[in-house]
């Protein structure tokens, strides 16, 4: 099978899902996803198999960023809590508020909505990393390549994002900090 | 629990659940878990939370995504090739006499190739459809890819042929100027060279009709260019019988090309108004109208015609300008406006017309357009 077709087959769903989760619009997600693969086709000779995944996510994310910058920013709830994150403050990306996602109907829509709301409530720099590592299942190294930051930064942000997420979903997960809110505002 | 009372997760907990610890560190951490019930609850909660994230469904784009991607690759590939080929196309001789916007010509052609919205409004021109079933690594040109460019080419040729056939002026310099502006603004020589290269890549069964058209057109255009240059150096009129004869011998390909309705966004009003304000030369304004026509900017043709008539109401091109505006209305699917204009400018009945006016109107449009006009005139008279 042709190399490009293999990539298309393997990453079509994940890249579309990733983009959709950021833009929350079918046609925009499709458009960005198509453009991502067109760029892959053009650069195919220069891309190694071991970096293809990170390359695709980085291109898709940059296209989403371009798209979002052209639209009016929306507010988001800042993740706060312990000052443990040691990376520099960067200009936050302003992603769309989530609407209904392309999720399958489940018996637990409330949980699905809470997951989406919780992720949307995070500052984009934290949401980025949890989306890439824990939803898209990229390695820390790959996420660092996508976000163009250090692996250490990825790990630091991921820890904070996960704790925020775990505590927001306390009633759905078996844990000791049932009352634990680490400071989502709004 | 208030934020101040919150018990942070130890950093190594994340490494543990991710399996990023060494075997020895993992054994040590598991011994800690056995001893520390609070830490154990945190680990369980984190695992449960991650499980929720891992189980979020993977969405798929709507069916046909791969084909749409391949279609888009074809478009960009063809546009890239168009840019390269236009850049390498030979420069026509008359470029030395008149400045031409090469970049604009190239851009216009690329737009034609990729079917920019607004330029080609026929739904068959949808670049995302009908491109499936082929290998994705090799992009070869097809008849479908070329149809928009061919339709544009044929429309430009028909406009040139009809308008050159109606050049009837006594002054040899004006005659040469009018023939030259048709060749220049049609941009057919450059486009023909480019299309020849594209058509040569079509499968033989699809190639023949288009190749004949392009070869015959090349002969006619070179004859036209030779006549312009010859008339200038020999101080004589252009031999229009020769030019028109060669153009009449060009056979337009049948079939699918005719299915495209060409319509481009109009130029800004200020551009044409500025030209009118800055010129007292009716040929300059007439040339603006011809440029709009070659660009399929029908609203621009009408606007330029109105400006011409405002500035040069009894000018030497007034009948030609009115006839072109009538054709433009028809091309914008406005037969009633076409008929109204005809009747206001020329008269209600054929017997009201001056000699040659009806032949001019008929000569600047297709037979089907003229039939539409006739029908609209009948309805308007009722």
Image (spheres, coloured by chain):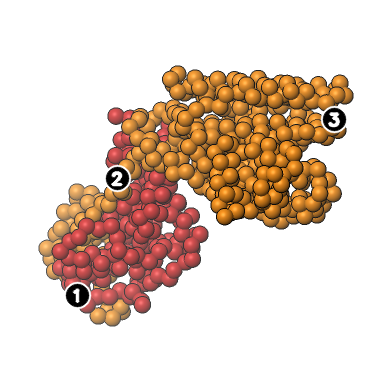
Chain colours: A red, B orange
Q: Relative to B286, is A107 on the left or the right?
A: left
Residue most extreme to the bottom? B2
- Report the front residue among B264 and B308: B308
Callouts 2 and 3 in the same chain = yes
Q: Relative to B117, is A120 on the left or the right?
A: left
Real-space Cα distance between discs 2 and 1? Answer: 43 Å
Real-space Cα distance between discs 2 and 3? Answer: 63 Å
Real-space Cα distance between discs 1 and 3? Answer: 96 Å
Up-down relation of residue A117 to residue B225 (above or below): below
Circle 2: element type: loop
Q: Chain of mark 3?
A: B
Question: Are the residues flagged by discs 2 and 1 in contact, CB closer than 8 Å?
Answer: no
Residue beneath the point at 87% across and 24% down: B235
User: Which residue is tagged 1?
Assistant: A178
User: Which residue is tagged 2?
Assistant: B63
- Report the front residue among B139 and B306: B306
Q: Relative to B268, is A104 on the left or the right?
A: left
User: Which residue is tagged 3?
Assistant: B172
Residue B337 x %, y %: 61, 53
Circle 3: element type: helix
Q: Chain of mark 2?
A: B
Quarter holding the C terminus of chain B?
bottom right
Residue B109 x %, y %: 59, 37
Up-down relation of residue B326 to residue B212 (above or below): below
Circle 1: element type: loop
Question: Are the residues flagged by discs 2 and 3 in contact, CB closer than 8 Å?
Answer: no
Up-down relation of residue B283 to residue A104 (above or below): above
| Between marks 2 and 3 in the image, the one whose residue lies nearer the viewer | 3
Residue A162 x %, y %: 28, 63
């Amino acid at each position: 099978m042709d190399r490009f077709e293999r990539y298309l087959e393997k990453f079509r769903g994940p890249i579309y899902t990733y983009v959709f989760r950021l833009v929350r619009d079918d046609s925009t997600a499709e458009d960005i996803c198509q453009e991502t693969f067109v760029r892959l086709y053009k650069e195919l000779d220069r891309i190694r198999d071991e970096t293809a995944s990170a390359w695709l996510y980085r291109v898709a994310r940059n296209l989403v960023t371009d798209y979002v910058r052209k639209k009016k920013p929306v507010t988001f709830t800042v993740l706060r809590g312990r000052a443990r994150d040691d990376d520099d403050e960067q200009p936050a990306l302003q992603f769309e508020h989530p609407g209904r996602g392309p999720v399958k109907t489940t018996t637990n829509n409330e949980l699905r909505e809470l997951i989406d709301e919780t992720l949307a409530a995070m500052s984009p720099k934290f949401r980025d990393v949890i989306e890439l590592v824990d939803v898209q299942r990229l390695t820390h190294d790959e996420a660092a390549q996508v976000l163009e930051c250090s692996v250490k930064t990825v790990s630091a942000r991921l820890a904070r994002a996960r704790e925020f997420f775990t505590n927001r979903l306390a009633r759905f997960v078996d844990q000791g900090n049932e009352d634990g809110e680490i400071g989502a505002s709004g | 629990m208030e934020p101040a009372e919150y018990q942070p997760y130890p950093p190594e907990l994340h490494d543990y659940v991710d399996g990023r610890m060494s075997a020895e560190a993992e054994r040590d951490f598991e011994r800690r878990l056995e001893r520390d019930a609070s830490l154990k609850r945190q680990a369980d909660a984190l695992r449960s939370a991650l499980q929720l994230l891992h189980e979020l469904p993977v969405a798929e784009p709507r069916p046909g995504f791969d084909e749409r991607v391949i279609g888009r690759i074809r478009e960009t590939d063809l546009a890239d090739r168009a840019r390269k080929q236009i850049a390498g196309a030979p420069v026509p001789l008359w470029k030395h006499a008149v400045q031409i916007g090469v970049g604009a010509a190239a851009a216009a052609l690329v737009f034609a190739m990729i079917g920019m919205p607004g330029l080609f409004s026929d739904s068959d021109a949808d670049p995302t459809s009908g491109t499936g079933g082929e290998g994705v690594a090799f992009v070869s040109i097809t008849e479908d890819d070329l149809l928009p460019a061919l339709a544009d080419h044929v429309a430009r040729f028909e406009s040139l042929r009809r308008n050159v056939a109606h050049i009837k002026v006594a002054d040899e310099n004006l005659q040469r100027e009018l023939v030259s502006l048709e060749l220049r603004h049609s941009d057919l020589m450059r486009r023909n060279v480019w299309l020849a290269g594209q058509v040569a890549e079509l499968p033989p069964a699809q190639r023949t009709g288009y190749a004949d058209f392009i070869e015959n057109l090349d002969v006619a255009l070179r004859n036209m260019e030779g006549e312009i240059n010859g008339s200038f150096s020999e101080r004589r009129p252009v031999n229009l019988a020769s030019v028109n004869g060669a153009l009449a011998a060009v056979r337009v390909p049948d079939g699918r090309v005719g299915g495209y309705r060409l319509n481009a966004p109009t130029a800004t009003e200020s551009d044409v108004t500025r030209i009118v304000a800055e010129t007292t030369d009716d040929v300059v304004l007439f040339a603006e109208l011809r440029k709009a026509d070659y660009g399929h900017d029908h609203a621009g043709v009408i606007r330029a015609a109105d400006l011409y008539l405002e500035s040069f109401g009894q000018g030497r091109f007034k009948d030609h300008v009115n006839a072109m505006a009538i054709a433009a209305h028809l091309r914008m699917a406005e037969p009633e406006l076409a008929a109204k204009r005809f009747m206001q400018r020329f008269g209600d009945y054929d017997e009201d017309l001056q000699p040659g006016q009806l032949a001019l109107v008929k000569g600047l449009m297709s037979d089907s357009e003229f039939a539409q006009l006739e029908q609209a005139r009948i309805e308007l008279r009722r």
